[in-house]
Image: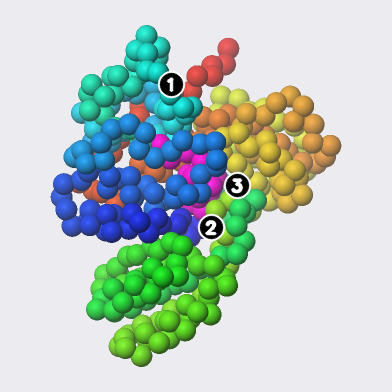
Amino acid sequence: MPLPGRINLHSKTEWRAAGNDMTIRVDHISAFLDHQAPPTTKLDFDNIGLLLGNGSQNISNIVCCLDVTPEVIDEARRLNAELIVAHHPLIFKKLSRINTATEEGKMISDLLNNDIAVFAAHTNYDVANDGVSFIMAERLGLSNTGFLQPMQENDCMLEITSEPEAADQVQTILDRFGDSIAYSSSAAGQAHFRVVTQKYLLNELDGALKSAANQINSWSYSVTQDQPSHGLGVIGELETPMNSGQFLDFLKETFNCEHISYSGSPGNIERVALCGGAGAPLISSALNKADAYVTADLKYHEFFTGKSDFLLADIGHYESEIPAVEELAERISQRFPELAVHVTSVNTNPIKHH
């Protein structure tokens, strides 16, 4: 599995404080989700974060979904949920008016009247290094996974361990250099940090850590690997190579697909590329690196790859992304066991097959 995603330093204090406070607020969840998928990595066209509601609102129930629909709002109301966490933003384009005669306006009105906040993690969750496509890869049991198309190549990852009394000092140093920090404590009480920093800062950071090490009884760190901070799609290896028919059956069962559209018929599939949602722009990258590419929302002409021994499969937008909703709900539940976290029972896929 890939390393956890970046953490927004500005949200770190809020997130850590939540663990010591039995009263959970919307902004605690917002901060945690920003850790999972930093908002700075979203694509330019996107609209993410807390789209509706008050960050200071106390919450006890959350509903996670792919799409916010009237049926999901009704479900949230029945469950007494104060927050909906969605992958697709309810408010995507800039609003010039809220007309309750429209479906969007009525949903916004219903949410406000019932004090239900809405948070969206969309393209930032798509490009995270444990995000949508990596979750697809995990479902397929792929190994040696990495980004199909990394979006940043100049990062390196450091792992740091210290005794508890040194944790604040280490964190102060990392705040100066790190783009992100993941903090945890072990059962033995040691503090563990994972930080992504720019390569050109590595020597200066190394000096600061070595200087601090003279004042710390037990402390160590290592540069573990070069680590792109985020990227598009995933590529990895199947545990057991398959032929085209076996692989398509495997996809259909894994992602609960009614049908799969595909082209090409390689005799052997071992390296697989994936992209949750609309992944047509990555076809050329997958052609050069994989035996098969699995994504969604492909047009007719895009199935002509010019390579008959390459399998291109469209499993459906909903089918490719709903596992990420389930995984996100699990992560929230593990981090905030005080909350009741529900994955919506509503199938919001608007596409039906006759």
Question: Which callout, 3 or 1, points at the residue further toward the start of the chain?
Answer: 1
Q: Which residue is mark 2?
A: 229
**At label 2, which amino acid type do we have?**
Ser
Which quadrant: the C terminus? Answer: top right
Q: Is residue 104 left or right of residue 136?
A: left
- Name the mark nearer the viewer: 2 or 1: 1
Q: Is residue 191 magenta?
A: no
Q: How is the image coloured?
A: rainbow
- Spatial CA distance of label 2 from label 1 is 35 Å
Q: Which residue is mark 1?
A: 96
Q: Is residue 240 left or right of residue 131?
A: right
The residue shown at (26%, 29%) is 116
**At label 3, which amino acid type do we have?**
Leu
Q: Are the residues at dot 3 and dot 2 in contact (C-beta closer than 8 Å)?
A: no
Please tell me whether mark 1 sits on a helix, a strand or a loop: loop
Specify the quadrant of the image occupied by residue 186: bottom left
Span colored in magenta: 120-136
Q: Are the residues at dot 3 and dot 1 in contact (C-beta closer than 8 Å)?
A: no
Disc 3: CA contacts within 10 A as few (<14), some (14-19) or many (>=20): many
| Image x and y of residue 89, in percent | 44, 31
Single out the residue that lies furthest toward the bottom: 214
**At label 1, which amino acid type do we have?**
Ser
Disc 1: CA contacts within 10 A as few (<14), some (14-19) or many (>=20): few
| Image x and y of residue 159, in percent | 44, 72
Q: Which residue is mark 3?
A: 232
In the image, residue 167 above or below residue 123: below
